[in-house]
Image (cartoon, rainbow, N blue to C red):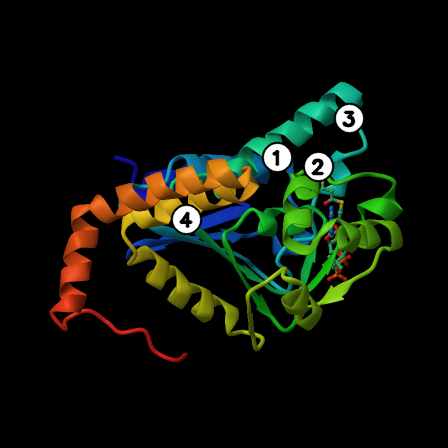
C-alpha cells in the first residue's frame, strides 16, 4: 500500500503533501514563482492523484504564499513547437483528469491570483473555497496563447461560454465576491480562513460513504451531460446500487432509530 511518506518522497520540491486523518493536503509550494505550474509540478500533481494512499478519503488542494497560482510557467513556453505544444497540453489534461475523475473528492482553497492554468487547476476540483483576496483571470488572450489545461471544457460548465469569452477577449478580472456570484466558488471566507474552512469541508466529505462519493464524483457529472432519458436510467441504477450498500443501510437504520444526525440550519 502507498503511504503518504512514500508518495511525498516522489513529489518535486514544488509540491508538499501531508495527511491529516482521512484528508490528504497537497500544497503548491513555489511561492517565489507565485506557484506557476512548470512541467515538473504538473507531472507531480498527476503522480499524487494517481497514487493516493487507500486511507485517504478526500484531498485538500491549496497554495503557499500570497497566491494560489499564476498559471502556466511562462518561461517554459518559449522553446516549444506545435507538436510539443499539443503534447504539453495533453499532459495537463491527463493530470487534471486524475483530479476530477480520480479516487476521491478534492476541495480547493483559493487565494490571491487564481489565473490562467491556476484557474484551470481549480476548476478540476469538486468544491472551491475562496478567500476574499482571490481574483480570477485568463490572461492567455492578451499573451497570444490559449488555455490548455482543460479550461475550455470545465470553465464554461461553471460560468458559461459568454463569461469565459469575455475573460479571454478583454482580460477581465473577477473579484472573489464576483467569482462567488457567478459560480466559480461555492464558499467565500475572510483572508486566512480558507484552509480551516476547506479542511472542515474535506473532513465532512471524508465521512460520507465511499460509494456515495463515487456516485457524486463519477456518475453525477456524466449524467448531467447525458440525454435526459439515458440520465434517468443511469440515475436509477446509481441510486439502487448506493442504497444497497451495507453502510447506507446502517446509516438509515441509525436515523430511524433516532441515532443519526438530523438536517440542521447552517
Ligand atoms: C512567473 C509567473 C508565470 C510569476 N510563469 N514565472 N500567467 C500569467 O500570465 C500571470 C503572470 N503573473 C502575474 O501576472 C504576476 O506574477 C502575479 C499577479 C501572479 C503576481 O504578481 P507579483 O507582483 O506578486 O509577483 P511578480 O513580481 O510578478 O512575480 C514574482 C516572480 O514569479 C517573478 O520571477 P523573478 O525571478 O523575477 O522573481 C515572475 O517572473 C515569476 N512569475 N508568474 C513564470 N506564470 C495550460 S495552458 C495555461 C496558460 C496559462 O496559464 S497563461 C497565464 C500565465
Looking at the rendered structure, which numbered label has been put on residue 148?
Answer: 2
**Image location (x, y in percent) of residue 95:** 54, 35
Of residues 161 and 188, the one nearer the viewer is: 161
* 82 over 115 or under it: above or below: above
CB-based contact (under 8 Å), mark 4 and mark 3:
no
Q: Residues within 10 Å of mark 2 (few under 14, many from 20)?
A: many
Using the numbered discs, state the Cα–Cα distance from disc 1 to disc 2 in whole angstroms: 7 Å
> Earlier along the polypeptide chain: callout 2 or callout 4?
2
Left or right, 35 with reference to 58: right
Using the numbered discs, state the Cα–Cα distance from disc 3 to disc 1 in whole angstroms. 15 Å
Q: Which residue is mark 4?
A: 216
**Which residue bears the numbered disc 1?**
92
* Residue occupying the far left of the picture: 257
| Residue 149 to residue 209: above or below | above
Q: CA distance from mark 4 to mark 1?
A: 23 Å
Is residue 161 in view from this perspective? yes
Total labels drawn: 4
Residue 233 shown left or right of residue 28 in the figure? left
Which residue shows up at 16% across the image and 47% down it? 246
The residue mark sitting in front, 4 or 3, is: 4
Residue 200 position (above or below residue 2): below
Q: For the residue with label 2, is its CB less than 8 Å from the closest atom of ligand 1?
A: yes
Dot label at residue 80: 3
Q: Assign the N terminus to one quadrant of the image.
A: top left
Q: Of discs 2 and 3, which sits in the foreground?
A: 2
Sooner in the amino-acid sequence: mark 4 or mark 3: 3
Q: Position of residue 134 (x, y in %)?
A: 66, 66
| Residue located farthest toward the front when viewing the structure as drawn | 229
Which of disc 3 and disc 2 is earlier in sequence?
3
2 and 3 marks in contact (CB < 8 Å): no
Observer-side mark, 2 or 4, equals 4
Amino acid at each position: 500500500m502507498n503511504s503518504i511518506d512514500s508518495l511525498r518522497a516522489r513529489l518535486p520540491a514544488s509540491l508538499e503533501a501531508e495527511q491529516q486523518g482521512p484528508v490528504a493536503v497537497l500544497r503548491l509550494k513555489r511561492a517565489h514563482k507565485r506557484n506557476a505550474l512548470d512541467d515538473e509540478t504538473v507531472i507531480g500533481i498527476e503522480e499524487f492523484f494517481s497514487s493516493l494512499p487507500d486511507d485517504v478519503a478526500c484531498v485538500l488542494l491549496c497554495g503557499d504564499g500570497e497566491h494560489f497560482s499564476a498559471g502556466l510557467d511562462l518561461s517554459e513556453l518559449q522553446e516549444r513547437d506545435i507538436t510539443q505544444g499539443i503534447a504539453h497540453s495533453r499532459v495537463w489534461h491527463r493530470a487534471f483528469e486524475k483530479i476530477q475523475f480520480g479516487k476521491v473528492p478534492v476541495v480547493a482553497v483559493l487565494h490571491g491570483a487564481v489565473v490562467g492554468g491556476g484557474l484551470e487547476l481549480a476548476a478540476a476540483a469538486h468544491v472551491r473555497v475562496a478567500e476574499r483576496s482571490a481574483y480570477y483571470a485568463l490572461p492567455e488572450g492578451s499573451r497570444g496563447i490559449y488555455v490548455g489545461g482543460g479550461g475550455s471544457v470545465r470553465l464554461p460548465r461553471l460560468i458559461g461560454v459568454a463569461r469565459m469569452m469575455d475573460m479571454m477577449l478583454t482580460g477581465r478580472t473577477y473579484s472573489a465576491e464576483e467569482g462567488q456570484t457567478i459560480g466559480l466558488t461555492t464558499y467565500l471566507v475572510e483572508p486566512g480562513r480558507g484552509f480551516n474552512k476547506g479542511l472542515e469541508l474535506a473532513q465532512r466529505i471524508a465521512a460520507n460513504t465511499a460509494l456515495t462519493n463515487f456516485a457524486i464524483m463519477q456518475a453525477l457529472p456524466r449524467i448531467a451531460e447525458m440525454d435526459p432519458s439515458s440520465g434517468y436510467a443511469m440515475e436509477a441504477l446509481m441510486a439502487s446500487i448506493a442504497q444497497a450498500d451495507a453502510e447506507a443501510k446502517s446509516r438509515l437504520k441509525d436515523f430511524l432509530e433516532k441515532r443519526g444526525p438530523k438536517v440542521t440550519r447552517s
